[in-house]
Image: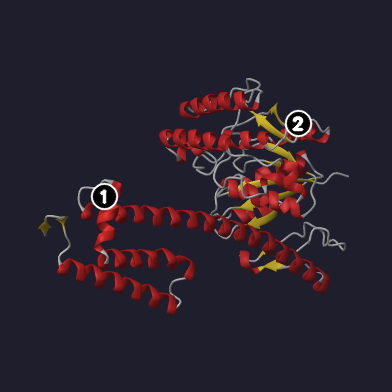
Amino acid sequence: MITDQGIVMSPRQQAFALIASVALLILIIELVRRRKLREEYSWLWILTGLVILVLSVWYGALLFITKLIGAVTPVSTLFMFGILFLVVTNIYYSIKISTLTTQVKNLAQRLTILDSYVREMRNCEDTNTKGSPMKDKSNGGDEVPNLMQCRDDNQSLKV
Amino acid sequence: MSRIVVIIPAYNEENGVAQVVKGVRKAVPTADIVVINDGSQDRTAEEARRAGARILNHPYNMGYGAALQTGYKFALENGYHYLAQIDADGQHDPECISDLLAPLLDGSADIVIGSRFLIDNGYRAPFAKRVGMLMFGALASRIVGYHITDPTSGFQALNRLAFCYCAQDCYPTDFADADVLIMLHRAGLRIREVAVRMYPSLNQRSRYLNMYSIFTPAYYLFKMCLLMFVTLLRRERVAREVILE
């Protein structure tokens, strides 16, 4: 709708934006309530919902921002912020994924080393109790040589 | 007496790993041998175990750098003083391990790289690899202040200070290249190269150790430029400080 103030949001557009933002907020809160979404990830989405809500009811603010950034129409302001938001969320998730990748790598390495200690201890126990080398069932029953010679001082078994 | 461990990262190397383990056992009888089985789908772990190595099994394939780092962490926890790393595909001559360890034992270096280019031993790398090594080797040499001929060599020996530092999160999980040498140099570690013999890989299908066959040259170029640039932008913490924590 074009008036002497420029392009204005029609009541229908305003209602749609209002419904969309409220629906987004309800969805996020419901996901947090059901523990499907962790609180630490929800803040960005709640912020988005609130911004859309504020801009849809307070049209003056949208006009002000449009003027501030030098955009031609309020719609392009909305699009620009929408894209900016998507870029920011993607970077945020990339950082999270990088952190998670490092954490998973460290966990897997820890697991690898602990697993070797467990195998070694089982071998030691088996050698001590039965007096014969253990058959390692997880590897198709191959004989496992006792390489660390079941050290009594447990120097190599700092678990 | 100094405790030495030789780590062998292996991924689908059932044909070559046993021979390498036996070679290492013969060359350095006092060293413990650890094969890091990086999620192989074949009988790598069994073959290495039969040959007399201790096995560290990764739960899934994590990459060459991550496999080396598991070895560093293991060495760190078990109180080893020196560590040598050798590829499982038979490219490296285990007899050269003692040459690699010598500068560590006399205290003149923290990291020793086995270079195939210090002497002419007939090794000819593929073209893309040669260009990459020349370019980034030259760049790394300029930054660290001495000549590095073989920055991609996986045949290395490290003292406790060096492998403690490499056990930190700053170590890459794919391939350690010239950027890692720059990082280690900036952390105050002394790097030296010694001449070693290298053979063509026993496993012709090996895609684990040959980064140039995984990455296209363009991607490798991009990755290395970016890595070297950001490595220079970072403030590396001095290795000794990291270890003291």
- Which quarter of the rendered picture does the N terminus of chain B lie within? top right
For the residue labelled by badge 1, is the local secondary structure a helix, a strand or a loop? Answer: helix
For residue B152, side relative to residue A22 (left or right): right
Is the residue marked by circle 1 packed among few (<14), some (14-19), or many (20+) residues within 10 Å? some
Residue under numbered circle 1 = A67
Residue in view at x 69 percent, y 67 percent: A135
Seen from the viewer's position, the closer of residues A57 and B61 is A57
- Tell me the tag on residue B170: none
Seen from the viewer's position, the closer of residues A112 and A142 is A112
Q: Pinpoint residue B48: horizontal percent, then vertical percent.
A: 66, 52
Seen from the viewer's position, the closer of residues B241 and B106 is B241
Q: Chain of mark 2?
A: B
Q: Pinpoint residue B57: horizontal percent, then vertical percent.
A: 62, 58
- Name the mark nearer the viewer: 2 or 1: 1
Q: Are marks 2 and 1 on the same chain?
A: no
Residue under numbered circle 2 = B99
As drawn, the residue found furthest toward the front would be A4
Q: Could you tell me the amino acid type at mark 2?
A: Asp
Residue in view at x 29 percent, y 59 percent: A61
Q: Pinpoint residue A69: horizontal percent, then vertical percent.
A: 30, 47
